[in-house]
Amino acid sequence: MRALYVILGLLFTLLVAGAGAGAGAIHHAHQNRERRIVELEQDLPALLFADPLDADQACAILELYLLSRPIDQALAVDCRAAKLDATGHGVVRLVGTIYASSVDNALLGGGFGTPHCLALSEDGWAVVGQAWRMDECVFDAEGGSSADAIAAAAGEMVDARRRAMAEHAIFGVRQALARSDSVPAVCEGLEPASGKAVGLVDTDVWSLDGFGEQGGFWRSVTSPTFTACVDGEEPSKYSLGCGLDEPWRYVLVLDAATKAPPQAIGHDQFVGGDYQATLKLVDMDSPRVICARPVQLSLDGTVLLAPGEWIVNHYHQRIQASLCEEVEQLSSGQLALDPYWACD
C-alpha cells in the first residue's frame, strides 16, 4: 500500500510540475510578444516611408500587424525567409513569413506561411490583406488613399473579375450544351486537371433568368453540385459564392432525367430513391461537350434503419460516390474533383 501511495505521490508531483512548466511557457511566449511589439513600434516611423522597401522592412511591418491586431493575434513571426515582389504601383507581395499563433510554435518554431499584400497608403506602407484574397496583390494603390480604402478598392476589383470569370464560364457551358454532337462515353488524351480547375454543375439548378435576385443558380435538393452568384456567400463544395477564383479548364455537367429523392412513409419504409442523369464533360477551350455517359442508381432493397433524414443523407452519399466513380471512368482517371468531394 505504501508503494502505491509513493507512486501516486510521484504522479501528482509530475502533473503539478508539468502544469507549472506549461504555465511558465505560456507566460514566456506572451512576454516575448509584448517585448517585440514595443521594439517594432519604436522602429515603425523609419519603416513606413522606406524607399525602396526591402523584405526585412516589409516583414517588420507585417510582424507588428500580426502581433497587435485585435483578433487572431500571432505570438511570434519568423522573417528569415521573407521575400518581396513588386506587383503593382505602390503594392508589394510578401512571402516566406511564418507566424505562430500557438505557444508550441512560438517557442519551437513553425506556424502559418500566408503571403500578404502591402500597399503605400497616405500613412505609409500598410498591410492591406492576404494575397490569396486579393489576386496575389496584382493591383495599384491610389496615392493619398487610406489603407482601408486601398483594401476596399482592391476587393471590389477582385470581386468584379471573379464574377466576370464565372459569367463567362457559364455562358461557355451553355453554348456547349446547346450543341447536339455525337460524343464517346470515355475521353482520351485529356490534360490532367483537378481542384478548382474542374467544375461540376447541374442543369436543373441553372436558371435562364440570369444573375438577378430572381435568377442566379440554386442548388437542387438531390445533387451536391456547384451553384454560383449568391452575393456574400463564401465558396464551398456547394457554391462558388459569386465568382470563380480561377478559370475552369473542364466542366462536368449533370443533365438529369430522373430525381426521385426518398421519402420515409413509416418507421422502416420509404418511397423513391431513384436517380438517372447523363454526365457530360465540357472542354472549356472549345467550348463543347467531348464525352458523356449515364449515371444511374436506385435505393431499392435498402433497409431503412431510422426514420427522418437518414435515408435522404444516404441517397446524397450514394449519388456523390457514383459521381466520383463515373468521373474516373469518363476521364480515364485524368480529372479529379475538388477535395471537398472526398473521392478516393
Image (tube, rainbow, N blue to C red):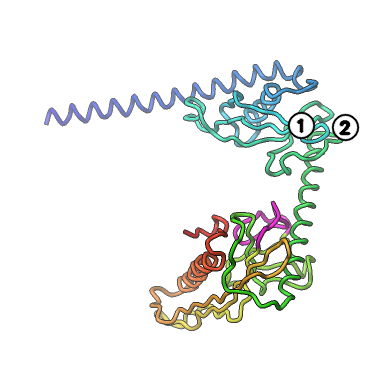
Q: Residue at x 49, y 23 (%)?
A: 27
In the rendered image, residue 110, in percent from the top left (x then y), is placed at 51, 31
Q: Nearer the viewer, residue 266 or 116?
A: 116
The answer to whether 36 is drawn above or below residue 268 in the figure is: above
Judged by depth in the image, the label closer to the viewer, 2 or 1, is: 1
Q: Which residues are magenta?
A: 231-250
Q: Is residue 138 magenta?
A: no
- First in sequence: mark 2 vs mark 1: 1
Name the side, left or right, on which 272 lies relative to 133. Answer: left
The disc labelled 1 sits on which kind of residue? Ala
Where is residue 24 shown, x and y percent of the image?
44, 22
The kind of secondary structure the magenta stretch mainly shows is loop
- Measuring 67% from the left and 67% from the top, which residue is drawn there? 282
Q: Residues within 10 Å of mark 1 (few under 14, many from 20)?
A: some
| Image coords of residue 344 (percent x, y) | 47, 59
Q: Residue 23 lies in what quarter of the image?
A: top left
Real-space Cα distance between discs 2 and 1?
Answer: 16 Å
User: At 71% from the left edge and 78% from the top edge, which residue is drawn?
Assistant: 180
Q: Are marks 2 and 1 in contact (CB under 8 Å)?
A: no
Closer to the camera in the image, 85 or 156: 85
Q: Position of residue 85 (x, y in %)?
A: 72, 31
Instruction: Give the secondary structure at mark 2.
Output: loop
Q: In the image, is residue 284 above or below residue 6?
A: below
Q: What residue does disc 1 label? A: 86
Circle 2 crowding by C-alpha within 10 Å: few under 14, some 14–19, many from 20? few
- Residue that appears at 40% across and 78% down: 302
Residue 81 vs residue 243, the one in the foreground: 81
The residue under label 2 is 143
- In screen coordinates, is 54 left or right of 310? right
Secondary structure type for disc 1: strand
Left or right: 164, with 258 as reference point: right
Q: Residue furthest left?
A: 1
